[in-house]
Amino acid sequence: MCYDHLTRAYVSTFVIFIFSESFVTLVDNLIPLLSISTEHMKMSLSLVNSYALIYPESFAEKFGGIVCTELNSSIGDMRAEGIAMVLRCVETLLRTSPTHGPHSVKPIVGKVFQ
């Protein structure tokens, strides 16, 4: 019985942590992974999409431009699969944040149309 209560307390604490704004500050640790190599790109872009879905406006406003700039610098070295993942990330930013999304994806969209 005690284990059940501890599990509920742990889950409740975890959910409160996820939905607090301090959770977004962990993105600072994610940004270097985007520029280091493409080895962790799939997981990193999955996390970027998750942040964009959970915190659409605040994520796009604070980190969208930085993330897109980092992705733009490595998009030339990617294969078609990696570019497709980046474009899905761009689409997620545009759909979830109509006010800040277009400004944050300018580095990538500018390169696509050049």
Image: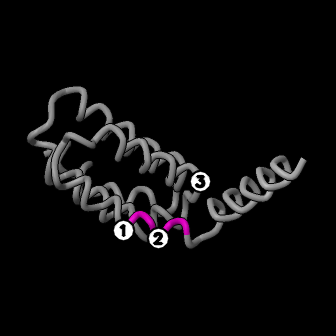
Kind of residue at disc 3:
Ile
Q: Earlier in the sequence, mark 1 or mark 3?
A: 1
Q: Is label 2 or label 3 in front?
A: 2
Of residue 59 and residue 6, the one placed in the foreground of this image is 6
Name the residue rendered at 50%, 52% in the picture: 52
Neighbours of disc 3 within 10 Å: few (<14), some (14-19), many (20+): some
Residue projecting furthest to the left = 77
Q: Name the spot of residue 49 as percent of width and height, x first.
A: 46, 46
CB contact under 8 Å: marks 2 and 1: yes
Name the residue rendered at 25%, 53% in the picture: 34
Kind of residue at disc 1:
Asp
Residue projecting furthest to the front = 2
CB contact under 8 Å: marks 2 and 3: no
In the rendered view, would you say 44 is above or below 31?
above
Name the residue rendered at 45%, 62% in the picture: 60
Q: Name the spot of residue 83 as percent of width and height, x first.
A: 23, 35
Would you name the residue on which mark 3 appears? 54
Would you name the residue on which mark 1 appears? 28
**Which range is magenta?**
23-27
Q: Name the spot of residue 103 as percent of width and height, x first.
A: 37, 62
Q: Name the spot of residue 9 as percent of width and height, x first.
A: 79, 58
Q: Is label 1 or label 3 in front?
A: 1
Picture mark count: 3
**What secondary structure predominates along the stretch shown in magenta?**
helix
| Residue 25, numbered circle | 2
